[in-house]
Amino acid sequence: MRDVQSERDERNVPLKHVGIKNLKYPVVVLDKKNKKQHTVAEINMYVDLPKDFRGTHMSRFLEVLNKFHLKIDPKSIKAILDDLKKTLKAQSASIEIMFPYFLQKKAPVTKIESYMEYKCGFKAYDTNEQCEFYIVVEVPIQTLCPCSKEISKYNAHNQRALARIEVETSELIWFEDLIKLAESSASVPLFTLLKRPDEKYVTERAYENPKFVEDVARDIALSIKENKKIRWFKVEVESFESIHNHNAYACVDSDTMEV
């Protein structure tokens, strides 16, 4: 059969990324407590395309992924990228994997356990010169506004927020450790199940620990900077404001802190 994708293209335009996006795929990931966890990932996979090729072979991305039997960890990701470059005759390959990750979490007072969902994943970019590997976590938290507390007689506005941490490392860093770091930097963590004593604690704890998104971003960054395994990081905090029709946002990375 005619191989249309491999036909020569005369427009002389190389493409940086071609591939598949938003693929839902069952995976098994490492779990610090239980060794492994089954989940469903959303995956993007790309390679570069030289200027003289019309297209890539999309089916081969899935064929490469299927070889690894659902297992996703730093070592397998590097192997996937190597296989992509070899199979598709590419100079570079990249993969982005994000998935829901569940941890059992105890309520602060009653200690009742329930499952808390986080969004975690990996990003990796492999060229002939180097392979860059990133670990990503997205952690729901709560913030309480210091300004609102200062100027209000009765209360202070508070809301859910999202802390997103991305780190570059050559060694494994557990999702759980990054999640703990983000939650400890918030006004108070979030919980799936709260009884009245727990709700009282969470409400009062947030009021006693007011933080802007700027505060949370800086506190996370300072904690990450102490970890010698991390070569580069980026922290984003977005607050879904309860009294404004917009969100509050702060961002810092290791490059910023070196300025």
Image (cartoon, grey):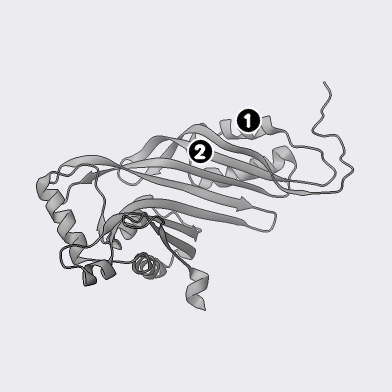
Query: Left or right: 149 with respect to 67?
Result: left
Percent coordinates x, y for residue 135 in the rendering: 47, 53
Q: Work out whether residue 42 or residue 215 is closer to the camera in this orientation and state it.
A: 215
Residue 143 position by quadrant: bottom left
The residue drawn where x is 36% and y is 52% is: 139
Query: Left or right: 157 with respect to 93?
Result: left
The residue drawn where x is 52% and y is 79% is: 259
> Mark 1 packing: few (<14 Cα in 10 Å), some, or many (20+)?
few
Q: Count how many numbered circles sit on residues in the image.
A: 2
Against 64, is 179 above or below?
below
Q: Amino acid at mark 2?
A: Glu
Residue 89: numbered disc: none
Residue bearing mark 1: 63
Q: Amino acid at mark 1?
A: Glu
For marks 1 and 2 on the same chain, the one whose residue lies earlier in the sequence: 2
| Residue at the farthest bottom position | 259
Cα distance between the residues tagged 1 and 2: 17 Å
Q: Work out whether residue 81 or residue 110 is closer to the camera in this orientation and state it.
A: 110
Query: Left or right: 78 with respect to 93?
Result: left
Residue 250 position by quadrant: bottom left
The residue drawn where x is 28% and y is 70% is: 147
Against 217, is 40 above or below?
above
Percent coordinates x, y for residue 162 in the rendering: 37, 54
Mark 2: secondary structure: strand
Contact between labelled residues 2 and 1, with CB atoms less than 8 Å apart = no
| Residue at the farthest right position | 10
Mark 1: secondary structure: helix
Percent coordinates x, y for residue 144 in the rendering: 26, 62
Percent coordinates x, y for residue 30 in the rendering: 40, 43
Residue bearing mark 2: 42
Quarter of the image where the N terminus is located: top right
